[in-house]
């Protein structure tokens, strides 16, 4: 038998090749989660433990999402917010108003939610990040990069911005529903890991 052909058919070689291929596949599978970068700001004088309920509001300048993606976003973020001790409500008496903006095909500028709704005096001017070793993007402006999700949390009574978080590489135009679902779930968990914020 040809020596080259024999070596390729060697069981031990095939086993090692299979292991290497498996490891490569696993590495590729986790790359999207590692590539998601998080940046956030918050009001250092806010006592976040006092908040118990929240309601969602769409930013007037945010793009319209299809029903499936909107449902995936709501399900993923609601599940993480429950872990933070928050309960969703549609009532106007909610403690927090959460406003979302997304960027799918083009970058989006972060703009004011409504007239009279603004950051408080203790709101941070700089961003904190926790992208980690696998991060590739740093967020340092008021532009939401393509594929990113921005969440703004307002104290409903004071109409003051108390927390803002942006996570990149979370939405992909043309992605399959299953892939989009996984990306959004990972984004929700990673972004809300920083809520409530840890004060220095």
Image (cartoon, rainbow, N blue to C red):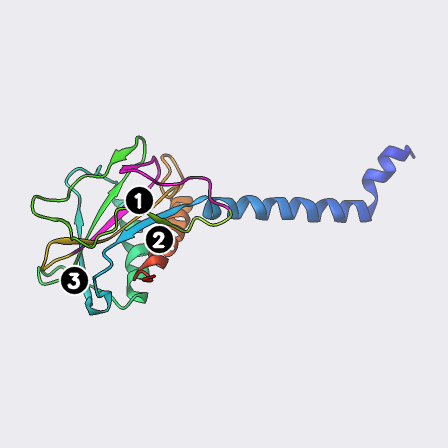
- Residue drawn at the location 15% of the way across and 42% of the way down: 112
Residue linked to disc 1: 149
Q: Which mark is residue 38?
A: none
Residue 44 lies, in percent from the top left, at 24, 59
Taking depth in this image into account, of 70 and 171 the one nearest to the observer is: 171
The residues bearing labels 1 and 3 have C-alpha atoms spaced at a distance of: 21 Å
Precedes in sequence: disc 2 or disc 3: 3
The residues bearing labels 2 and 3 have C-alpha atoms spaced at a distance of: 21 Å
Indicate left or right for 66 with 19 as reference. left
Q: Which mark is residue 89?
A: 3
Taking depth in this image into account, of 101 and 1 the one nearest to the observer is: 101
Precedes in sequence: disc 1 or disc 3: 3
Residue linked to disc 2: 191
Residue 155 lies, in percent from the top left, at 15, 58
Query: Dot 1: few (<14), some (14–19), or many (≥20) neighbours within 10 Å?
Result: many
Indicate left or right for 32 with 72 as reference. right
Q: Nearer the viewer, mark 1 or mark 3?
A: 1
Residue 38 lies, in percent from the top left, at 37, 48
Q: Pointers 2 and 1 in contact (CB under 8 A)?
A: yes
Magenta segment: does it hold 141? yes
Quadrant of the image for the C terminus? bottom left
Taking depth in this image into account, of 199 and 134 the one nearest to the observer is: 199
Precedes in sequence: disc 2 or disc 1: 1
Magenta segment, principal secondary structure? loop
Rendering quarter of residue 61: top left
Q: Pointers 1 and 3 in contact (CB under 8 A)?
A: no
Rendering quarter of residue 59: top left
- Residue range in magenta is 134-154
- Residue drawn at the location 9% of the way across and 63% of the way down: 93
Q: Secondary structure at mark 3?
A: loop
Magenta segment: does it hold 128? no
């Amino acid at each position: 038998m040809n020596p080259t052909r024999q070596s390729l058919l060697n069981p031990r070689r095939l086993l090692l090749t299979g292991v290497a291929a498996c490891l490569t596949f696993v590495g590729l599978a986790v790359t999207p989660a590692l590539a998601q970068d998080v940046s956030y700001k918050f009001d250092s004088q806010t006592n976040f433990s006092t908040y118990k309920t929240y309601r969602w509001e769409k930013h007037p300048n945010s793009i319209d999402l299809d029903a499936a993606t909107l449902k995936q976003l709501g399900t993923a973020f609601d599940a993480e917010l429950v872990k933070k001790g928050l309960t969703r409500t549609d009532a106007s008496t909610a403690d927090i108003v959460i406003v979302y903006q997304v960027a799918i095909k083009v970058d989006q500028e972060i703009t004011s939610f409504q007239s009279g709704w603004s950051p408080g005096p203790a709101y941070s001017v700089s961003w904190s990040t926790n992208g980690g070793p696998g991060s590739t993007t740093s967020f340092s402006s008021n532009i939401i990069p393509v594929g990113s999700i921005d969440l703004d949390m307002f104290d409903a009574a004071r109409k003051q911005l108390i927390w803002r978080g942006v996570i990149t590489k979370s939405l992909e135009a043309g992605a399959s529903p299953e892939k989009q679902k996984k990306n959004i779930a990972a984004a929700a968990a990673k972004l809300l890991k920083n809520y409530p914020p840890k004060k220095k």
